[in-house]
């Protein structure tokens, strides 16, 4: 602001001329005005925070009339609580000047008292966060719950009631719960019953059979997140296959060779035959069940069955699209092609040789044209 430091504050002797002094005085006045405005704004902010804090405490007092004793703070708020001659002296000795009254530290040198007040302060804030979370939860759509819990405070993520409510609405919200709640069976059960995929976040309960059963009952694919011991459990595997046959890919190898388990899988979803043991891919009953479910499943059958005329005839009669994966030699067999066309007219395109233009085959397909859109 000036070229040389002043020799004595307030004296014109330190300036070379009156113009320089006036410029310095104007600059100083400008800074004083700015500081005054800043002080007024800080005082207003302090008053607003104090009012907000008091409103919060009054609301909490309505909910919990006996749980919130008045606080003592360095600013002297509610001095009546436990006021004694000693506490008055401590209050006089305490420093004043904390602006944010919602974050003021309690008076006194007693560490136990300080800890007690600090815990109470945190508890008050946690109650407010918890109430806000539950209000938001009731208005959010299911897929928004995950982000709601993810963005919540650690106190909310560790609150059992909040997490339980969130998991009942959106199971995979369990991902953002406190680690202790991920080991809480009731919370995890609520999560997997809403969405079986939530099992992946239940680190300590993946080996719990009841939890795994609840998960695969909702979604068979949840079997992939179960402990290895449960992926070997036939009851758990059967439950998963009945819900979604694709879950066969996550079962233990020993169960992939179990005919009962594989039958349950292919009956629910034929193409799961792909994950069965090779011995069962050559089993007439298993392959027939898979082909009946979906004709394209026949592609996973053993080559010996694809060349078996009697078996192929039976398969295409159940699902004509299986003709696509039969041995080429059988695609020139008129009886097989006719059986496939009768079952599914569009399967005529898989025939070989002149059968695609055969009058009888075309007539059979045309006759069924009104039933099947081809």
Image (cartoon, rainbow, N blue to C red):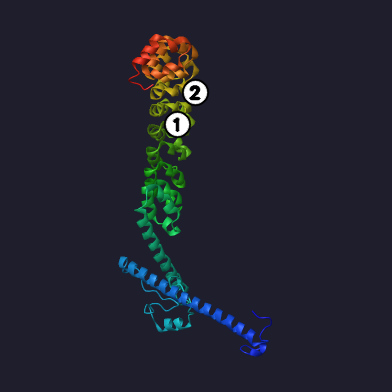
Mark toward the start of the polypeptide (1 vs 2): 1
Residue lying at the far front in this picture: please name it: 19
Q: Quadrant of the C terminus?
A: top left
Disc 1 + disc 2, Cβ < 8 Å:
no
Q: Say if 336 sits above or below 140 in the image.
A: above
* Residue matched to label 2: 278
Q: Residue at x 40, y 50 (%)?
A: 145
Residue 82: percent from left, percent from top: 38, 78
* Residue matched to label 1: 248
Q: Say if 224 sits above or below 312 in the image.
A: below
Secondary-structure class at tag 1: helix
The image quadrant that residue 162 belongs to is bottom left
Q: Say if 256 sits above or below 181 in the image.
A: above
Residue 228: percent from left, percent from top: 48, 38
Residue 355 shows in the view: yes
- Nearer the observer, 174 or 98: 98
Q: Residue at x 47, y 32 (%)?
A: 249
- Nearer the observer, 278 or 317: 317
The image quadrant that residue 117 belongs to is bottom left
């Amino acid at each position: 602001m000036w070229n040389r430091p002043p020799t004595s504050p307030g004296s014109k002797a330190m300036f070379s001329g009156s113009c320089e002094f006036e410029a310095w005085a104007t600059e100083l006045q400008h800074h004083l005005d700015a500081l005054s405005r800043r002080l007024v704004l800080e005082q207003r902010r302090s008053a607003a925070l104090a009012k907000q804090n008091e409103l919060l405490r009054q609301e909490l007092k309505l909910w919990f009339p006996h749980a919130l004793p008045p606080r003592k703070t360095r600013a002297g708020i509610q001095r009546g609580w436990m006021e004694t001659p000693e506490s008055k002296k401590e209050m006089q000795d305490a420093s004043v000047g904390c602006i944010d009254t919602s974050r003021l530290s309690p008076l006194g040198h007693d560490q136990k008292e300080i800890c007690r007040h600090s815990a109470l302060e945190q508890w008050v804030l946690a109650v407010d966060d918890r109430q806000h979370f539950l209000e938001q939860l009731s208005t959010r759509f299911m897929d928004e719950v995950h982000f709601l819990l993810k963005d919540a405070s650690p106190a909310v993520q560790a609150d059992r009631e909040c997490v339980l409510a969130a998991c009942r609405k959106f199971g995979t919200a369990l991902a953002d719960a406190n680690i202790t709640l991920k080991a809480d069976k009731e919370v995890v059960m609520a999560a997997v019953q809403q969405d079986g995929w939530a099992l992946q976040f239940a680190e300590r309960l993946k080996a719990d059979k009841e939890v795994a059963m609840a998960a695969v009952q909702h979604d068979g694919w949840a079997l992939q997140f179960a402990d290895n011991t449960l992926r070997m459990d036939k009851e758990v595997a059967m439950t998963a296959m009945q819900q979604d046959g694709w879950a066969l890919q996550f079962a233990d190898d020993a169960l992939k060779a179990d005919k009962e388990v594989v039958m349950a899988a292919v009956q629910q979803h034929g193409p799961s035959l792909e994950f069965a043991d090779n011995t069962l891919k050559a089993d007439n009953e298993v392959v027939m069940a898979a082909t009946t479910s979906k004709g394209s499943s026949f592609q996973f059958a053993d080559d010996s069955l694809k060349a078996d005329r009697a078996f192929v005839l039976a398969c295409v009669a159940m699902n004509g699209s299986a003709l696509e994966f039969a041995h080429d030699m059988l695609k020139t067999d008129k009886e097989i092609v006719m059986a496939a066309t009768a079952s599914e007219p569009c399967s005529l395109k898989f025939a070989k040789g002149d059968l695609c233009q055969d009058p009888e085959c075309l007539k059979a397909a045309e006759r069924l044209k009104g039933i099947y859109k081809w």
